[in-house]
Image (cartoon, rainbow, N blue to C red):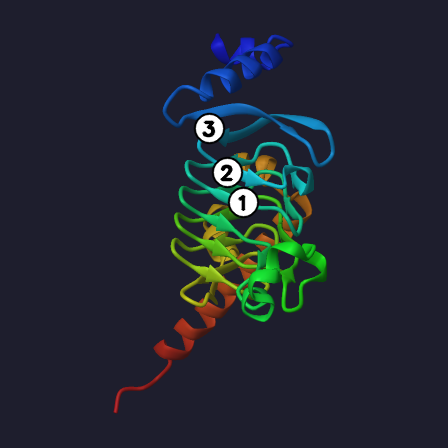
Amino acid sequence: MLRAIYLSPLGYIISAAMQAVATFKQPFMVYGYYCRGDRKFRKNTRVSSSASITSAEKFHIGDHAWIGHYVVIDASGGVRIGEGVQISFHSSIVTHGSHVSIRLLGNNYIRIPAKQRPGMVLESVSIGDYSYLGTGATILPGVQIGRGCVIAAGAVVRENVPDFGVAAGVPARIVGDTRDQDAAFVNDISVAGTYFDKERWTVVCAYAAQSKTAENAASDSTSNVEPA
């Protein structure tokens, strides 16, 4: 019942009320987000009342995304978050770094516009559709994360992550492929109809078939070895 009401035109009023209440209450998920970057309302996106987004006019987010409690997003260099992305608690996205400039400029730092400061880092970050950032993950300036990726809890990502990549560690390294996890569901008809990228689903199925063929070949090779 409540879901039906929210998905109706009354949902806009409900979202506005929740935004107001969030100012006075403990952290909770606010349904609906007005994206200042493109001036569009993402009705199915949920952003914690405790999340901090600076330079919101340079922040773009798709619908069906989720940003958890105490997430910090510095969008001064530009941030683009795709549809369905989930960012877990206490994670950070950083697009600028002043650690060199403050030494080079000393007490003149504040007097010089950011883009004119020597040594200043100001680079955009993007996260592809339906990727996931684990608790406490940190994404550094200039990083581009592909679609369908998983960033492990506590990872510090300073290099690009390709589509379906699993990255973990400090600094983060590619340690897996989410298609390995998704392949377990290739026989589930319902998943075939809901997978986030219909074209990619055929790739996942092909990937699963190749993996199965390789496993069978390895098994046959082992079984054909004669005992010493």
Q: Which residue is mark 1?
A: 73
* Image position, residue 54 (x, y; %): 58, 41
Q: Amino acid at mark 3?
A: Ser
Question: 10 Å neighbourhood of mark 2: few (<14), some, or many (≥20)?
Answer: some
Seen in the picture, residue 220 relative to 7 is either above or below; the reply is below
Residue shown at 71%/36% (left/top)? 37
| Circle 3 Cα neighbour tier, 10 Å, few/some/many (<14 / 14–19 / ≥20) | many
Instruction: Identify whether 89 is placed above or below 150.
Output: above
Whether residue 143 is visible to the viewer of this picture, yes or no, is no
> How far across and how far down the image is residue 23, in percent?
46, 21
Q: CA distance from mark 3 to mark 2?
A: 8 Å
| Amino acid type, residue under disc 2 in the picture | Ser
Figure check: 28 above or below 184: above
Residue holding disc 3: 49
- Cα separation, mark 3 vs mark 1, equals 13 Å
* Label 1: how many Cα within 10 Å (few below 14, some 14–19, many 20+): many
